[in-house]
Image (tube, rainbow, N blue to C red):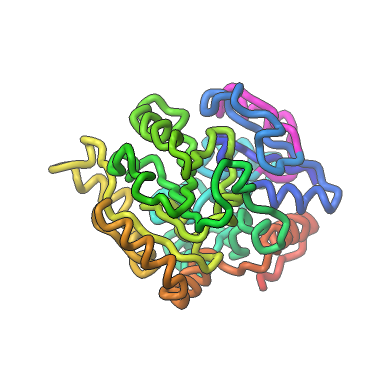
Amino acid sequence: MKVLFDAKNIYYLPQYSPVIDALLSRGHQCECIAYEDKNDKSSFNLEKISDLKVKLKWVADEDAALNYYLQQKPDWIFFGNQFSELDKVHQFSKTAQLGHGVGPKNSYYSKSNTPMTVRFIEGAERLRKIQAQFPDDQFVQVGYSKLDPLFSSAMKGLDIKKLGLDPNKKTILYAPTFNPSSIESFPDNWPEYFPDLNILIKAHAFSWQRKQYRGQRRKLNKWARYDNTYVALSSEISLLPFMISADLLVSEASSTLFEFVALDKPVIVCDFYFLKWFYRGPFRYRFERRFKIDNVHYRDIGVHVENYGQLKSAVIQQLENPQQFHQQRMTMTEKHIGPTDGKVSQRIVDYLESNLAGVIPIND
């Protein structure tokens, strides 16, 4: 088979990479297509993109990507989000949607507004909800491919000492999203208040790339000056090595919360974040509509803090009692991540091969 992967945003690649590995291991041909209008091409090369075993083909934009797909006529094309003019694509190729996150935003569900040949779904609860919204479309529950390297022991953590941190200290990971983000609500000197801990900070790619988030970049650069803190570079795409190395996660509305609890490690949810003006006051309904629909799913995922002042005591308490939310984490993982056996990508490739052969795949 010839399979293409649409990387409109480069941060989709950690989701694709395990599937690409599984395809290559069975002798299939793969290629990733990246968009120049969505990413800073000069910031990325093969060495900087974690474990990607195929080269990137750069195209100008979505129109150029469409033209390339119509020219190449691959057997399958993977997308991490919506794509226009699927009718043209479907004349020659089948399409698969593989979401790049499992967060609480409504976009998780709305990206299926344009139906593809199949969408691969993570957990049972996610499958139930999306089938109810789109009863005529094809969904197959397989799990969350991005996490395969964690559960197949294929990936190592960070070299804490090489990063200038103390390997004898416990490590917390702060992984904020870009919008709504808690970055603006953290003080410039917050690493000073955690001298006995290592701090890893992994911001969303948009926090580094987009002009409107330059205030977030100023914060990140200030935090990077502290001896007990490492701020990931924009070229460090994959969050997985950071997750492996961390004892605890701090985040707000990021799908990282669901990913981290699959490792049965504690999380702290920041219920405070900066809202843009068009989400405040009389426009609050816009925020509720976009971000709050699925937030109930992580209500019991771990400790919630209402403001930055509550963070330190929550961190200490959770590091001392990491098993407090064990059962909730297991329930969340089953519902939203799905099986954590390291074989999600194999199930996806099984489906692709069986579908092309005209055999109806059995979803175990």
- Residue 98 makes an appearance in the image: no
Residue most extreme to the left: 282
Residue 64 magenta-highlighted: yes
Query: Is residue 249 rendered to the left or right of residue 362?
Result: left
Residue 57 magenta-highlighted: yes
Q: In which quarter of the image is the C terminus?
A: bottom right
Residue most extreme to the bottom: 327
Rendered image quadrant of residue 34: top right
User: Residue 66, relative to residue 280: is it above or below?
Assistant: above
* In the foreground, 217 or 2: 217
- Residue 361 makes an appearance in the image: yes
Percent of width and height locating residue 4: 70, 40
The residue at the point 62 percent across, 38 percent down is 6
Residue extent of the magenta highlight: 54-77
The residue at the point 58 percent across, 33 percent down is 235
Rendered image quadrant of residue 218: top left
User: Residue 8, relative to residue 352: is it above or below?
Assistant: above
Residue most extreme to the right: 27
* In the foreground, 35 or 113: 35
Percent of width and height locating residue 64: 61, 24
Query: Is residue 191 rendered to the left or right of residue 187?
Result: right
Query: Is residue 255 rendered to the left or right of residue 291?
Result: right
Percent of width and height locating residue 8: 56, 34
The residue at the point 83 percent across, 52 percent down is 25
Number of callouts in the render? 0
User: Residue 10, relative to residue 28: is it above or below?
Assistant: above
* In the foreground, 200 or 353: 200
User: Residue 32, relative to residue 310: is it above or below?
Assistant: above
Percent of width and height locating residue 5: 66, 40
